[in-house]
Amino acid sequence: MPLVTLRQVLDEAQKREFAVGAFNFNNMEQLQGVMQAFKNTRCFGIIQASRGALKYTNHDFLHHLALAAVELFPDVPIVLHLDHGDSLDTVKKVISLGFTSVMIDGSRLSFEENVALTRSVVDFAHPRGVSVEGELGVLGGIEEDVEGKSAFTDPDQVEEFVAKTGVDALAVAVGTSHGAYKFSAEPRIRQDLIQETHRRVPDCAVVLHGASSVPSSLIEEIDRYGGSMSKAKGVPIKMLQEAIKRGIRKINVDTDVRLAVTATIRRVLNERPDVFDPREYLGEARKRITSIVEEKTRAFGGANRVPEDFQPISLKDQAARYSRG
Ligand code: G3H
Ligand code: 13P
Ligand code: ZN
């Protein structure tokens, strides 16, 4: 089936109150591992590329990797999404490559500048049927919020932001942050802000970034085989499940896949010092990605959610829906 839009997938998630995992990819093994898990669990899948990923793969290569995924996994409804887009130019570039969804991250701008940038992206994307995710608030932990380096999403700004921009999805800052070191003390996120955001804009899907769980088993494996990551800490799965109950519909994961790859490669090379064929350790890493993504999809309630008679809405039809309002 062709690529689908974030709007259609998140509408399904909204209706049946589950969350869709959005996984970053930078190379063939990551994409294959993630796609195999989507297929095994019969779920909707979001594959996303950051600007770093686009640069690393030289844009066109990433585009062709995504085309291969569509062709080789015809039963999986996949959204191809830009993660943390910074400008209208980046958005135009990826839409020309066939992305069906974009994030525009104006979170470091003032509220008015964020609205203006996000609106300009919606005005470009929606007539092409492409979905848009915006962000309100600055990601960071509870401690950073106290120090003023992050700023949690203010529910009082949410309705105005969504009404003025027309975004399909909204990323919120509620205490998570990117990477493997999310909390120096016990993990804590502001579930109340998720619930209040969802209550105020029930038709706009709420998105959680920085949602990797940083499993201690992977950290121990990395450290056992020469790494040094003992202070790494993520968002426990139970906390994510509570966040889904409160309204989260898209969960962004990059770090856990990176950890799975690194742990596996370190282990294989340590246990089998004679190995020099990259297919040995990359193949193992790919299998590990599949099992991690399957586990998450099940935990997020996304397994077996694609109806037998699922029909993707074309970009043209989606554009017409947007224009009708
Ligand atoms: O949002 C951050 C993602 O983990 C992407 O990271 O910019 O290093 O590709 P990256
Ligand atoms: P993690 O670093 O927690 O995996 O978050 C990824 C993310 O939010 C990508 O946008
Ligand atoms: Zn993010």
Image (spheres, grey):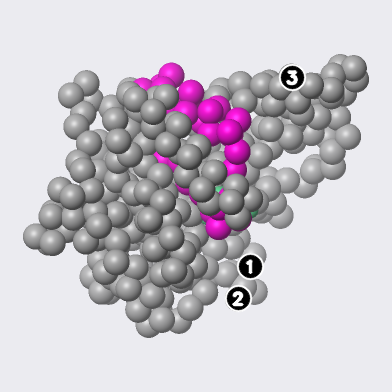
221 left or right of 71? right
Residue of label 2: 148
Which residue is more in the foreground, 12 or 27? 27
At 79% from the left edge and 33% from the top edge, which residue is drawn?
222
- Bin the neighbour count of mark 1 within 10 Å (Cα to Cα): few under 14, some 14-19, many 20 and up: some
Q: Horizontal and vertical percent for residue 100?
A: 34, 49
The kind of secondary structure element at disc 3 is helix
Sequence order check, earlier mark of 1 and 3 = 1
At 24% from the left edge and 54% from the top edge, which residue is drawn?
129
Q: Most prominent secondary structure in the magenta stretch?
A: helix
Q: Horizontal and vertical percent for residue 280?
A: 74, 19
CA gap between label 3 and label 2 equals 46 Å
Under mark 1, the amino acid is: Glu
Identify the magenta region: 26-54
Asked if residue 66 is among those painted magenta in the image, a careful observer would answer: no
Residue of label 3: 280
8 left or right of 176? left
Which residue is more in the foreground, 267 or 317? 317
The answer to the question of whether label 2 and label 1 lie on touching residues, with beta carbons closer than 8 A, is yes
Residue of label 1: 144
At 84% from the left edge and 22% from the top edge, which residue is drawn?
276
**Screen quadrant of the N terminus:** top left
Query: Quarter of the image holding residue 308?
Result: top left
- Bin the neighbour count of mark 2 within 10 Å (Cα to Cα): few under 14, some 14-19, many 20 and up: few
Under mark 2, the amino acid is: Gly
Q: Horizontal and vertical percent for residue 321?
A: 13, 54
Which residue is more in the foreground, 212 or 24? 24
